[in-house]
Each structure stands twice: as structure tokens, then as C-alpha cells.
Image (tube, rainbow, N blue to C red):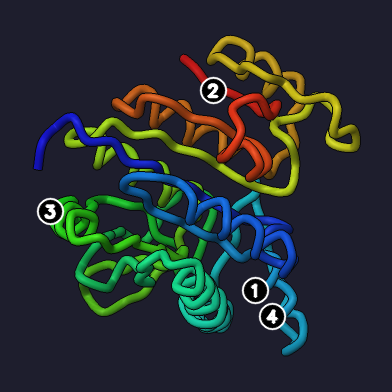
Amino acid sequence: MENNKSVSIIKIGGNIIDNPTELSQFLTDFSAIEGYKILVHGGGKSATKMAESIGLVPQMIDGRRITDAAMLDVVVMIYAGQINKNIVAQLQANSTNAMGFSGADGNLIHSDKRNHPTIDYGFVGDVKKVNTNLLETLLSNGIVPVFCAITHDGKGQLLNTNADTIASELAIALSDVFDVTLNYCFEKPGVLFDAEDDSSVIENINQELYSKLKAEKAIHSGMIPKLDNCFNSLSKGVQKIKIGHHRMLQNDEVICTTIQL
């Protein structure tokens, strides 16, 4: 495949997934994107709701979920099942030939169980390798991959993996072959100075400003893993990253946050 091809990687989460009207509009916008594209979705709120309904108490540290065996069952069921297949079906209705994947399917995303010196994250995976050859084959044959936030360790164990990280690692891996644009879409218009004020969008964030805002605790804790992934991606070859409402996919004039080194 020629090296001058481009691919758009879009990650959705938050209230887009939980709002049928917003999800439908997003998938219409996503379907209108020309060229190669990949969709990555989370589903944390849906998984949390399901977990609580059966008596599990979700635990989060710095925006990342602690995943014990019972919680892993829930997230696999919700992410790889209900959410993923609902999205694939709606994309097919939009004439987008989507196919749903976990990292285990086709050995597309291999992870290792997280080994942290002080925190036991449970069955949480950190991405180690992306099967770019298979992804290239899928894309070149007109398939639009739709990834949920589940990977595997190659030894039969599924692992819960941050969806922002999956999008980032896919972007990094494919940047060797494609010009990659990475977009994080959620219910807000971008990264905000004030989480309660949607008009307070930080339109451009570089590493220096990010370090300052993080030190001042001026960024919501749930946004920190997303931004960490953004700067990691840019440092490893990803060309362009934006964070904001999905309206930005179809209109370049929509205010959002652009991340740059």
C-alpha cells in the first residue's frame, strides 16, 4: 500500500454513546468522512450503570477503571457486545461497511496486563503491539474497523484497555504507513478552562501549557489520560489531533481544541 494514503481515526465516548440521538448524528457524520477511517468507542457510563445494577461498585483512579474479574465480565458484555454491535448495525444503515473488533479478533491489538508498583488495576491491559498488516488489508478492502475497549494478552486473557489509549496506539502504529489524523469526539466542544462553562474552550494546547495546567490542577482528572495520549501520539509520528464535539468532523470552522507539541 502506498505511503501517501491518509486515515482518520475517531474515538467517541461519554454522552454521545449514551444519547441515541447524538449517537445517530455522530454516525451520520462519521459515515460522511471520505477515505480510510477507523472508529474507536468507549462506553464507561454504560458499563458503570450495568455494574451498579448488579451490585458492583466501580472504582476509578486518575480517570482509569479498576477492573476485577466481575467488572471485566461487565465491560466485555457492554463494550464488545451491546455497544459495538449497535454501532456496527447503525453504520451499515448509513452505507458504511463496518466490522466490529476487540483486540483479540485477528490478533489486532496485543496488550500486557498492567504491572504498577503501587496500584493493582486488575484485568487492565497496556497496548504492546498493533497488527498493522491486517488493518491495512481491512482498510484496502473497504472495511471500516470499529474497535471496542477490549484487548488480549495472547494467552487467552481479555483485558480492559482505555479507549483513548487504543485510539492513540492505533494512530501511532499506522503513522508508519499513513498520514494519520486523530480526533477525540465527546459531548463537550473541547478541553475547557472551566468544566462547567462550554464557552471556555482552550483552542490550542502545547506541551508547555499542558504541564502548567496539570500542575495547577486546572484540568479535569478524566481529561488527563486523554491529553497524555495525545502528546505521546504526536511525539511518535501522528500528524494532527483534535478534541471536541463531533460537529468538528464535518465543519472546520467549529471551535474545538487542537493539540500540538
Residue bearing mark 4: 51
User: Quick one: label 4, few (<14), some, or many (20+) residues within 10 Å?
Assistant: some
Indicate the amino acid at tag 1.
Ala
Residue 91 falls left or right of residue 211: left
Q: Where is residue 168 in the image (x, y as percent from the top left)?
A: 41, 42
Residue 153 falls left or right of residue 20: left
**Mark 3 and mark 4: Cα distance apart in space:** 36 Å
Indicate the amino acid at tag 3.
Asn
Residue, x 21% and y 56% (percent of image)? Answer: 135
Decide which of 64, 165 is in the foreground and name it: 165
- Write down the quadrant of residue 150 in the picture: bottom left
Callout in the foreground (3, 1):
3
Q: Which of pointers 2 and 1 lies earlier in the amino acid sequence?
A: 1
Residue bearing mark 3: 133
At mark 3, the secondary structure is helix
Q: Do the residues labelled 4 and 1 touch (CB within 8 Å)?
A: yes
Residue bearing mark 2: 259
Callout in the foreground (4, 1):
1
Q: Which of pointers 2 and 4 lies earlier in the amino acid sequence?
A: 4
**Mark 4 and mark 1: Cα distance apart in space:** 6 Å
